[in-house]
């Protein structure tokens, strides 16, 4: 689902204020009544901006700068951080927020976006992926497929697309057998090369087929794949192992998702 609200500069020259769509990623307190809001935008990528007075009861900004909100914002340029002067919610994703599991998936998605991106680096396809993923989380029960599809395409748009066609060491085409996935090299190792790499983990033929399909198909096609519990777990472990390697740390919200599954 796309929202036809384009970003635009207001005024002339180096504009003092501008309008943008924004997905709110997180907020941190700044002094008594203000907050610093981290947002993801189509034209400017990730930004941090100040929401003045948003901790005051009855603040007009308050609810519209909460994480997991898609807003239309007006910002004024500041010396250090820009200032959010208006925020009008386009979607607050009620179906996502009314369910603990979906909310937690939503926070995992936001954490990945925050962890993998730097400020002021435009990535329009990534904004679209983020927005589409949050809508999918509201409409579709297939949360594991939504998350894996999101992870694969996030990595794609950030230049970490895993190599799944040829062995990343010897370059031979990958055969339909038990291969290995090596997070360190970002792709598949053939059985011969994989056995010698301590960081590589075995990867089943079915998991490889699904990763290849999901890497290149649209979400409507991806969601048609029916997964058994074993394969779901394998895909989750492969993707999260690779993400952990790339970030060189655990993703905090993963442990919370694990708790909820128990
Ligand atoms: Zn090889």
Image: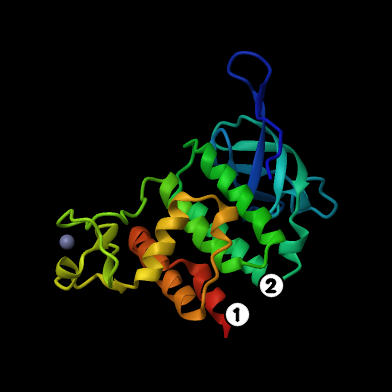
Label 1 crowd bin: few (<14), some (14–19), many (20+), radius 10 Å = few
Say which residue label 1 marks: 260
> Residue 218 got which mark?
none
- Which color scheme did the rendering employ for the protein? rainbow
Q: For numbered disc 2, what is the local secondary structure?
A: helix
Q: Is residue 12 visible?
A: yes
Which residue is located at x 50 percent, y 35 percent?
122
Q: Quadrant of the C terminus?
A: bottom right
Residue 197 in the image: state x and y as whole percent: 17, 69
Residue 88 in the image: state x and y as whole percent: 78, 41
Q: Is residue 25 left or right of residue 195?
A: right
> Residue 100 got which mark?
2
Q: Quadrant of residue 260?
A: bottom right
Which residue is located at x 60 percent, y 67 percent?
143
Which residue is located at x 40 percent, y 70 percent?
206
Q: CA distance from mark 2 to mark 1?
A: 9 Å
Q: Is residue 97 left or right of residue 211?
A: right
Which residue is located at x 52 percent, y 44 percent?
126
């Amino acid at each position: 689902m796309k929202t036809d609200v384009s970003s635009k500069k207001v005024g002339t020259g180096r504009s003092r204020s501008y309008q943008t769509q924004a997905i709110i990623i997180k907020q941190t307190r700044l002094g008594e009544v203000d907050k610093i809001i981290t947002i993801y935008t189509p034209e400017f990528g990730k930004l941090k901006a100040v929401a003045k007075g948003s901790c005051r009861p009855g603040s007009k900004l308050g609810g519209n700068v909460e994480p997991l909100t898609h807003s239309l914002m007006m910002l004024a340029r500041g010396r250090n951080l820009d200032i959010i002067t208006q925020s009008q919610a386009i979607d607050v994703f009620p179906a996502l927020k009314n369910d603990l599991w979906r909310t937690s998936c939503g926070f995992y998605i936001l954490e990945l976006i925050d962890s993998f991106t730097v400020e002021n680096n435009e990535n329009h396809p990534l904004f679209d992926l983020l927005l589409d993923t949050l809508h999918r989380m509201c409409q579709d029960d297939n949360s594991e497929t939504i998350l894996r599809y999101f992870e694969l395409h996030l990595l794609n748009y950030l230049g970490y697309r895993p190599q799944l066609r040829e062995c990343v060491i010897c370059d031979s085409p990958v055969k339909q057998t038990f291969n290995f996935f090596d997070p360190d090299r970002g792709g598949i190792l053939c059985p011969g090369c994989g056995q010698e790499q301590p960081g590589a983990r075995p990867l089943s033929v079915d998991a490889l087929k699904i990763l290849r399909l999901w890497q290149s198909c649209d979400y409507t096609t991806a969601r048609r794949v029916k997964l058994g519990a074993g394969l779901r777990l394998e895909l989750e472990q492969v993707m999260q192992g690779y993400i952990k390697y790339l970030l060189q740390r655990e993703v905090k919200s993963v442990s919370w998702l694990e708790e909820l599954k128990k």
